[in-house]
Amino acid sequence: MGKRKLKTVFWVFLLLIVTGLIGCKQKEPEKEQLCHIVMEKGDGYQVTDSVRTIKSGSDVSFTVTLDNNWQLLGTDYHGETEITKDDDGKTVEIVLHEVKYSESICIQAEKGKYEILYDANGGQNTSGDSDRVSICYRGTHQRINTSIGTDLFFRKGYTLLGWNTRADGSGQAVGLGSRIAWKAGLVLYAQWTPWTDEADFIYKKVSGFAVITGYSGKAQQICIPPSLGGLPVRTIRENAFADTDCKTVILSPGIYEIEKWAFRNSHLEQLYLYDDLEKISDYAFQDCDMLHTLHINAIEAPAYSGNYFDTFQDKYDRLLSMKDKKKIVLFSGSSTRFGYDSEMIDQAFPDYEVVNMGVFAYSPALPQLELIRSCMKEGDVLLDSPEFDAANRQFCYQKELDYATFAMMESDYDVFAQPDLREYKQIFTAFTAYQDARADMERKNYDVCASEYDEDGNEVEEPSYNEYGDYVVYRPNSTSEKPIYGLPVNYTVNAYPKDTYIDSINTEFQRFLDQGIKVYFTYSPRNKYALSEDSTQEERIRLHEYFKSQLNVPVISELEDSLYTGIYLYGTDNHLSTEGAQIRTEKVIRDLKEQFVKEEKK
């Protein structure tokens, strides 16, 4: 008996020892336990220190280096995972939070399917002898974002200005980082511009940098070098290029600031800059009355990828692909993003494609509408529902651009080369505001897609946007009718003066009408309890009649139909719940069908 008891005690003791050595114990969390984490090997990547031992409940990080043309999609870790990519997109840090058990983690990686071949076209490869570099892309957007290029090629005495589908520049031009429609066998050739002769510049040395103070040349095109006298060019001082006859100026990468009046009264028509330029204002181009085009090249990693601003370019991709098709385009701000079930409209009007172009009401509508108009044709339909809480922007009265304008352009700067700058104000001031806004933001990459995140920036399992551009994350009805923000909006005639708001939007509508595009006015949704005290029912009736009599396009809906109980609003006073969007869409379909019938009878 004594030997049997001693043997039993021995095995129990041994079992306790073994249990303590095999990872994390669930029954005794008060004792410090260890977890062994293994990041498994796989195709397309390498892991530095793939086996780690940590305390239970702590975080653990791994550094992953991706092979060329591979993208990291995620891991199979059951807890919270944080993934941070370097600007090059190849070095990735994975942080697993609050690890409680020993386990092996699988990395999910994918090789890009869409190959673009980049040709140095007279330049040199930065990392090899080949004149060509192949890059494969996942294709997370309808069109592909090109390489920023400066990490691929260089050419002494030249600035990389962009790409072209032909070596001689006679094909389709694409800015660095901007988008192009992919096709098999696509080759993009580097486009180089020679630096203007250093002798034409007057400059001085300031704190190890070259500061340009004057220009003595006569060239029609000036390409400002990234360095002068062996010093990097940092600043262009006031009046440095004042009164020059040049028509095109190219600001090379690395230039930090353009001071006021730098190009005052010059004959400048188009400007090229890179998105590492941080300080520039409209005063730099005072009295440059012929400046009409701004080309922006990407040299920095994007910051707004995955943000709702980023949806503009995805929506624009869809619109561009349907340029020659018959279509209905929905427009205003976020109330349009949240406010329609476009599939219902598609089914109700089978002869039309549908594109939801709503993004953000508090950025000027005019440049957005101009870009939309460029992709529309005779017989198309624009359905506009301006948001009254941003009336100065939504009615095209505000010509001053803002940071959000450029945030919407970030993933395809080429799109911004289309608007005529002479129609707008504070263009470069807005660009500086955009640079300030994203200065401390996390940098991402172009493969990140807005449909991977909800409105608040949280990752989602199912796409948050559908093919039409609707925000489709399920939004339950509210339990309260009360307004969210307590910011009452005026639904009164006096709030929408004819000589400002009405005349401005009529001018823009007329541009569409002149192209044979049908334009209809409907109302954006609003919590009926989020109106001002002056917005009585009688005043709302007056406002509706006022719009019908003053707008140069049909008002197809009743104003009262746009006012909803708070039950059908989600999170704000103008974002509809999922059910609310369906109710609103049914009304608009009815209104549009009735309008079509009226027109057929004429």
Image (tube, rainbow, N blue to C red):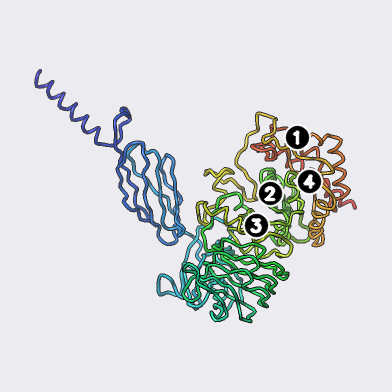
Measure the alpha-carbon separation of dots 2 and 1. Answer: 21 Å
What is the secondary structure assignment of the residue under circle 4? Answer: loop
Going 60% across and 56% down the picture, which residue do you hit? 434
Identify residue type, mark 1.
Lys
Q: Which circle's residue, 4 or 1, is located before the other in the chain?
A: 4
Measure the alpha-carbon separation of dots 4 and 1. Answer: 16 Å
Q: Which circle's residue, 2 or 1, is located before the other in the chain?
A: 2
Q: Which circle's residue, 3 or 1, is located before the other in the chain?
A: 3
Check contact, mark 4 vs mark 1: CB within 8 A.
Answer: no
Q: Position of residue 97 (x, y in %)?
A: 40, 41
Q: Nearer the viewer, mark 3 or mark 2?
A: 2
Q: Nearer the viewer, mark 3 or mark 1?
A: 1
Identify residue type, mark 2.
Tyr
Q: Nearer the viewer, mark 2 or mark 1?
A: 2
Identify residue type, mark 4.
Thr
Residue identified by numbered label 3: 316
Residue identified by numbered label 2: 362
Q: Which circle's residue, 3 or 2, is located before the other in the chain?
A: 3
Going 9% across and 19% down the picture, which residue do you hit? 2
Q: Residues within 10 Å of mark 3 (few under 14, many from 20)?
A: many
Check contact, mark 2 vs mark 1: CB within 8 A.
Answer: no
Measure the alpha-carbon separation of dots 4 and 2. Answer: 19 Å
Measure the alpha-carbon separation of dots 3 and 2. Answer: 19 Å
Q: Position of residue 537 (x, y in %)?
A: 84, 34
Going 83% across and 50% down the picture, which residue do you hit? 596
Check contact, mark 4 vs mark 2: CB within 8 A.
Answer: no
Residue identified by numbered label 4: 522
Q: Which circle's residue, 3 or 4, is located before the other in the chain?
A: 3
Residue identified by numbered label 1: 528
Measure the alpha-carbon separation of dots 3 and 4. Answer: 22 Å
